[in-house]
Amino acid sequence: MSIPHKPAATEAQLHELIANRWSPRSFDVSHKLSDDQIHSLLEAARWSPSSMNAQPWRFLVGLRGDSNFAALVSSLKENNLEWAPNASAIVLVAATGEKVSNIEIFDAGLAVSALITQAQSMGLHTHQMGGFSKSKVKEVFSLPENVEPIVLIGVGKISEPSKLSQALLERELAPRSRKPLTELMLKGLN
Ligand SMILES: Cc1cc2nc3c(=O)[nH]c(=O)nc-3n(C[C@H](O)[C@H](O)[C@H](O)COP(=O)(O)O)c2cc1C
């Protein structure tokens, strides 16, 4: 079975890093990320813009085989357990602030966006997960009160999907879809 290629279905001119990014579930379980690769991903996130340059994002990296990875996997909801443990790394992105508000969460999202685009540019794929227990993550890593887990990002090398269960295989091969732009415009350009 070949590796799916699922570019955005659009006639607009898009940068290939944006058009070709998608979130697979079939990761190569033998692939390892180098220290330099991890560093590049985190640096891309670190250089994101943020409100007042507060940089409220915080990161924690698990590499498949290490104890951080195992602890992050133990926090996953069932729907992510089948595939995410095959990723080369799982990155926890958290936000911090006196009281974590929409702004800190928004800034953390920008950092995620930079990280996943950097990964795409390095020939890697990413898959974000909200399906994990935030309280468990807080507990196992003894995170301070003012650090809120936001999302986990599986990072790795995509692989051909034949080993996925039937349900996940169907999702892996399904075309990507989006609401039409007309539905997204609050005013004008319709
Ligand atoms: C904040 C966030 C949380 C997500 N949580 C999950 C998740 O728990 N499990 C999962 O399989 N996919 C998850 N996804 C992936 C989305 O389902 C996926 O990005 C969306 O369907 C669009 O597909 P694409 O990324 O391939 O374009 C999440 C994505 C985001 C941004």
Image: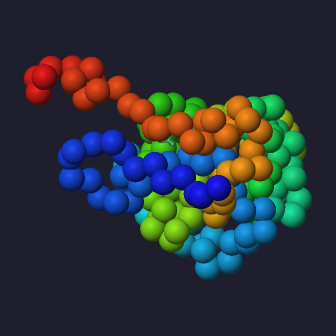
Query: Which quadrant is the C terminus positioned in?
Result: top left
Residue 46 position (above or below residue 140): below
User: What coloring was used for the rendering?
Assistant: rainbow
Q: Is residue 172 left or right of residue 181?
A: right
Residue 92 in the figure: left or right of residue 141 = left
Q: Is residue 125 among the parts visible in the rendering?
A: yes
Residue 44 appears anywhere in the view: no
Please provide percent x and percent y for residue 5: 48, 54
Residue 137 occupies which quadrant of the picture?
Answer: top right
Residue sitting nearer the eye, 47 or 20: 20
Position of 165 with respect to 47 (left or right) is: right
Q: Which residue is drawn at the image coordinates 41% and 55% (left, top)?
A: 20
Percent position of residue 143, x then y: 77, 45
Residue located 69% across and 37% down the image: 168
Name above or below for residue 18 compared with residue 42: above
In which quadrant of the rendered image does the N terminus lie? bottom right
Residue 88: quadrant of the picture = bottom right
Residue 119 lies, in percent from the top left, at 52, 63
Query: Residue at image x 77%, y 50%?
Result: 163
User: Where does the image place residue 107, in percent across and percent down from the top left?
Assistant: 45, 45
Which residue lies at the image location 60% right of the left edge and 48% below the top edge? Answer: 24
- Which of the four quarters of the rendered structure image does ligand 1 lie in? top right
Disc tally is 0
Who is closer to the viewer here, 92 or 157? Answer: 157
